Amino acid sequence: MRLFLIARHWQITTMQLIPIACIFWVGKFLSPVQVSFMWLLLVSVSVIWIYSIGAAANLALEPALQRNVMKFRIATCASLFILVMVLPIMYRLSQTDSAPQGWLVLLLFAGMASFYYMLWYAASQFVAAEKKAEASYSEFALPMLGFWFSIVGVWFLQPRVNRVLGS
């Protein structure tokens, strides 16, 4: 995980763009399972980047400012697990005329909630580590958006991550 703390923004962007390039340039020659795997690879790089920053920022804080990291780990694992479960199901549903079932919609909402918690935790802890004090929502809203749109956000956040957590 330390790799994501010392890497430069262009290196992380390259890790994110390789699956996208495979999907769009050679995707028509890939099976649906391989395309799903490429999307999973893209999201995994982004989620691991966010997790690395959140966990390292939490450790860099004074004990009084640290938060429970177990909820963050559970949210990260739940986000990836739900993504792995939902991608094949959504592909199968797109091939038929059937509507999504209720449990699938609930699973998607649970995945979004866990992903939002992961973004909130990483952004708040990162800004708190940067300031060495508790951060308000208005202070970590932009980093949270940067994590959410990580392909663009990495260009703005990673230099700050290198400065604060990369040493």
Image: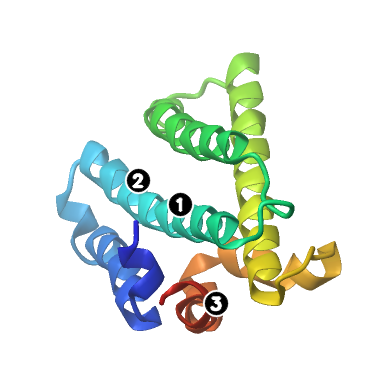
The label shown at residue 65 is none
Q: Secondary structure at mark 1?
A: helix
Q: Which residue is mark 2?
A: 40
- What residue type is disc 3 on? Leu
Q: In the figure, 6 relative to 121: above or below?
A: below
Amino acid beneath label 1: Val
Q: Nearer the viewer, mark 2 or mark 1?
A: 1
Separation of residues labelled 2 and 1 (CA atoms): 10 Å
Q: Earlier in the sequence, mark 2 or mark 1?
A: 2
Real-space CA distance between mark 3 and mark 1, rounded to the nearest whole angstrom: 14 Å
Determine crowd level at label 3: few under 14, some 14-19, many 20+ residues with C-alpha closer than 10 A: some
- Position of 103 with respect to 133 (left or right) is left
Amino acid type at circle 2 is: Leu
Number of numbered discs present?
Answer: 3
Kindly report the distance in space between the C-alpha atoms of the residues bearing marks 3 and 2. 22 Å
Please report contact status of discs 3 and 2: CB closer than 8 Å, yes or no.
Answer: no
Above or below: residue 90 compared with residue 118: above
Outermost residue on the front side: it is 63
Residue at the (21%, 54%) spot, across then down: 28
Q: Tell me where residue 147 appears, x and y as whole percent.
A: 57, 64
Q: Which residue is mark 1?
A: 47
N-terminal of the pair, mark 3 or mark 1, is 1
How far from the left and from the top, in percent, is residue 72? Answer: 58, 41
Residue at horizontal 54 percent and vertical 81 percent from the top:
160
Q: Callout 2: 10 Å neighbours few (<14), some, many (20+)?
A: some
Q: Which residue is mark 3?
A: 157
**Does dot 2 land on a helix, a strand or a loop?**
helix
**Where is residue 74 shown, x and y percent of the image?**
54, 32
Q: Is 131 drawn above or below residue 59 in the view shown?
A: below
